[in-house]
Amino acid sequence: LIDEDKYMEDIIQQVAEPEKEKDKQMTAAIHNAMKEASPDAELKPGAYSVRAPAWSFFRGARESISMSRRAKFGTKRARSGLNNAVTDTGIEDNMGDFIDEELSWWEALNIGTICVGCCIIAIVLVGVLIPVLKLNGDEDEPINAGPYEKVLFPLSGKDSFKDTTSPQSLAFDWIVYTDKLPIDSPNLIQRYSLMVMYFSNKGGDWIVHQTQWGSSDHECNWDYIECSVCSKENLNVVGSTSQALGTGGRLRHRSLENVFALPGKDGTQCVSSLIFDKAYLKGELVLPDELSQLEYLYKFDVAENNLSGKIPDNLYSLSTLQHIYLERNQFTGMISSNIGNLNKLKVFSVFQNTLTGQLPETMKTLESLEILWTSRNIGIGGPLSEFIASWPNLVEIDVSNCAFQGSIPEEIESLSNLKGLYLYDNKLSGSLPTELGLLTTLSRFVISRNRSMTGSIPSELGALRNVEELRIDSIDLDGSIPTELGNLSRAVIINLAENNLIGNLPSELGRCSSATELSLFNNQLEGTVPSELGKLSQLATLYLQRNNLTGEVPGQVCSLRDELLETFITSCSDGDLECPTPDCCTS
């Protein structure tokens, strides 16, 4: 930048000093010249030295040159007036050249300044604006995070964003700067909530099957996620668990996919299931508050991982949940009383963990409960009877290998949809209620190894025409085998071993045509082996040892060895029972 005052001083000295004697004449001439060159210039009146008019002259000349950018004849008029002034005052001829040179310099300086400025602006445009346009596509302005803050901050609370490494902060930055999801997107909150879940549980370590979380794909295409149409109607699951179980075997959650399929309608897709089974999750499971924003979530599955610690209490705040699968992990602690908040809960599976304590009283309010699996949690116990009577829609209950106490309540007869009853390896007492015979839908009844139970086998069990598995072994029941059990034509497994049963072996058992296993060993049965057992053409295993049976094994029974019977143990060598041929009995 040029110091204008100093520059003008230098020019005045060069012009005025050699011609001091012509001061007054020069003053008048230059004033006249300036008036002609720049009529609008403001001149200082009453000046009688070269300094004042020279200063004004050069200001006027510069203004004229500046005006030349708008009017081409401005500089020409300045030069014309200047030549007249030089002629009138008698200044040397080279003075005009000098002034010409100075005026040209000023003109070049202004033009050069403009050019340099234009170059700088061009550099800025090329070096800054173009990269920004390249990153932001057609956006002309940088991303404004303010609208996102107004929507997302209230969901998580402002304090959650103070730590820039918190899951909420990371999810917010991803939404705004990586995903760049428009603020008016209907799935903004859903996508944000899922990413908080992702960052809360070290999502970068999850096994990727097809589409990783955080990709540009719709979240319904990410691994471990299933979606349905966003409709409250879809939360009313089509079909029922009782229809799913049928008579084909023990119900397990992997068979529920078709039963609980949601109707396909056009509309926005919402997350309905989070299924992390066998995803190699480990450590403590974190369920952020933001998951409660998934208002159509009905299924949560983290089965068969390596998760530890307590079951997250936030799980029980997801009020739309109907299916919860936490089995085969290392969860500890008690089941929270907050489970009572899940009034739509149908399936609760926590088997094969290390949970402790009693079932919370609030579970009695879960009238929608259809399946309860707590097996292989040896620390879970307490009374069970009052709970069973509180779940009228129960389809299957498996509380085996726990520490439950008490008796089977008579009210069990109200469970008209019950298909699976697994009570083995507990500390149950009392006798088998006759009301069990009213469970006509029952297909699996296993109550083995409850040594504190007493009484006999109710004859009413013969009414369980749909039962496929009947295990009443190792209970120390007494009495005889009811002949009514011969009505169990669908029974595949009948195990009454290791009791104190007495009396004859009923010939009616020969009508159990579907039986593949008949275990009656270690009782006090008497008499002979009925030939009617030879009708059990599907029989593969027959255990009669350690009883008081006598006589010879019928040929009809021995002939089963030529069919499917692989194992036939009778203890022929130790008692009075005889085998007609060496190959009839296996031992």
Image (tube, helix red, strand yellow):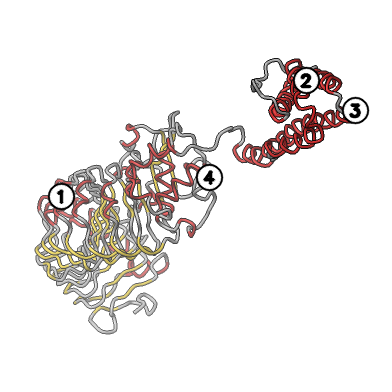
Looking at marks 3 and 4 on the same chain, the residue that comes earlier in the sequence is marked by 3
Label 2: which residue?
29
Looking at marks 3 and 1 on the same chain, the residue that comes earlier in the sequence is marked by 3
Above or below for 242 versus 487: above
Label 3: which residue?
93
Image coordinates for residue 159, horizontal then vertical, percent: 33, 49
Element type where label 4 sits in the image? helix
Q: Could you tell me the amino acid type at mark 1?
A: Lys
Mark 1 neighbour density, 10 Å: few (under 14) some (14–19) many (20 or more) = some
Mark 3 vs mark 4: in front: 3
Inter-mark Cα distance, 2 to 3? 15 Å
Mark 4 vs mark 1: in front: 4
Q: In this view of the protein, can residue 146 be seen by the observer? A: yes
Image coordinates for residue 445, horizontal then vertical, percent: 23, 57
Inter-mark Cα distance, 2 to 1? 114 Å
Q: Could you tell me the amino acid type at mark 2?
A: Ala
Mark 4 neighbour density, 10 Å: few (under 14) some (14–19) many (20 or more) = few
Residue at 31% x, 77% y is: 579
Inter-mark Cα distance, 3 to 4? 73 Å
Q: In this view of the protein, can residue 69 be seen by the observer? A: no
Looking at marks 4 and 1 on the same chain, the residue that comes earlier in the sequence is marked by 4
Label 4: which residue?
178
For residue 146, the mark is: none
Element type where label 3 sits in the image? helix
Above or below for 567 versus 203: below
Looking at the image, residue 60 sits to the left or right of residue 189; the answer is right
Name which quarter of the figure residue 514 lies in: bottom left
Name which quarter of the figure residue 509 lies in: bottom left
Label 1: which residue?
364
- Residues 280 and 303: in front is 280
